[in-house]
Image (cartoon, rainbow, N blue to C red):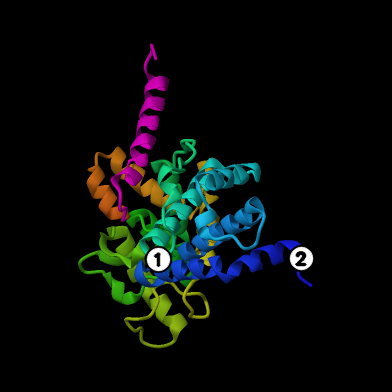
Amino acid sequence: MRNAHASRVSDADHGTGKDVEAFLRHLADERQLSRNTVGAYSRDLRDLREFLTGYLGTPEWTWEDADRLALRGYMGWCVRKGLSRRTVARKISAVRTFFRFLHQEERVSGNPTRVLRTPRQEKRLPGHLSRRGTDAILRVAEVRAGENSFIGTRDLVILEVLYGSGLRLAELQTLDLKDLDLVAEVVKVRGKGRKERMIPLTRAAVEAMRRYEPRRRDVLGRTARDQDPLLLSRRGARLSRRAIQKIVRKYLEAAAEAEGLSVHSLRHSFATHLLDAGADLMAVKELLGHVSLSTTQVYTHTSKERLKAVYNSAHPRA
């Protein structure tokens, strides 16, 4: 027997659910967003439909009934659930994209999100490692790789590529052998929206890959093929994202400052260290695969904060 909540949500499926399904197909097929991103949109819209069913007091509502006041009510509902401003802003962004789609497809007569204000977000600087912390982690990985084991050599490749090239977790996990050019020292990366970009590899990363190659062939038990994944498990299957997260977390423990940091922190460290060394902001934007320069500019705030900390600690009158 279904509970009342399940009944309310499913009763609204006859029309609104079909619109959501069409939107999710549009994201996956036309915009070619990743499965995880499409899943996040799906969850955000499921929450919106749950709220609207209760707010409007009927299971027979349509998207035309979701006016500006209703959407402001949804924002308040999210806040009362204890969601952070950042999470609420992300949900509202999903709602905006959805209603833009509905309006363009002429499924609604107007777009109520045009005048909807997003809650101001608290500023959060991305977590990253210092140069010393990064060196400490890589030293531990190099010692383990020096034992010439499959696990040790593979783990060093993971860390060198994440930090040396600033890849996202998903970008690293989906790399195949054919994406690598160790002679030219570059890697072809498929980023968000399946957009491709060429990223330089550090010499340390190339050396780590050459050390890993024979151990990788031992696991496969055959000649490597171009379409083979770069990172393998002990059984010869493509290494999962969760497995990569666990591996990186294990090495992060080697740095005292790494508490609370994650795989993505190596990408943040990559960008921060480049900017600290005087790299051009536009160049860093291209390396990271950001669409908007404003996304990359958060790393300039990080550098400024560190500069201010050095000034305050070193200047006699600071």
Residue 147 in sight in this render: no
Quick one: quadrant of the C terminus?
Answer: top left
Q: Can you name the residue that lies furthest to the right here?
A: 1
Which residues fall within the magenta stretch? 289-318
* Label 2 sits on residue: 3
Which amino acid does the dot numbered 2 rest on? Asn
Q: Which numbered circle lies on residue 299?
A: none
Which amino acid does the dot numbered 1 rest on? Leu
Q: How many marks?
A: 2
Position of residue 47 in the picture relative to residue 89 (left or right): right
* Label 1 sits on residue: 33
- Work out whether mark 1 precedes mark 2 in sequence or the reverse, and give the earlier one: 2
Q: x%, y% of residue 161?
A: 36, 60
Q: Quadrant of residue 4?
A: bottom right
For the residues labelled 1 and 2, the Cα–Cα distance comes to 34 Å
> Could you say which is closer to the camera, residue 272 or residue 293?
293
Number of other residues with Cα within 10 Å of mark 2, as a class: few under 14, some 14 to 19, many 20 or more: few
Q: x%, y% of residue 315?
A: 37, 17
Q: x%, y% of residue 240?
A: 50, 70
Number of other residues with Cα within 10 Å of mark 1, as a class: few under 14, some 14 to 19, many 20 or more: many
> Could you say which is closer to the camera, residue 269 or residue 76?
76
Residue placed at 51% from the left, 59% from the top? Answer: 63
Q: Nearer the viewer, mark 1 or mark 2?
A: 2
Residue 111 in sight in this render: yes
Give yes or no for residue 231 being in the magenta stretch.
no
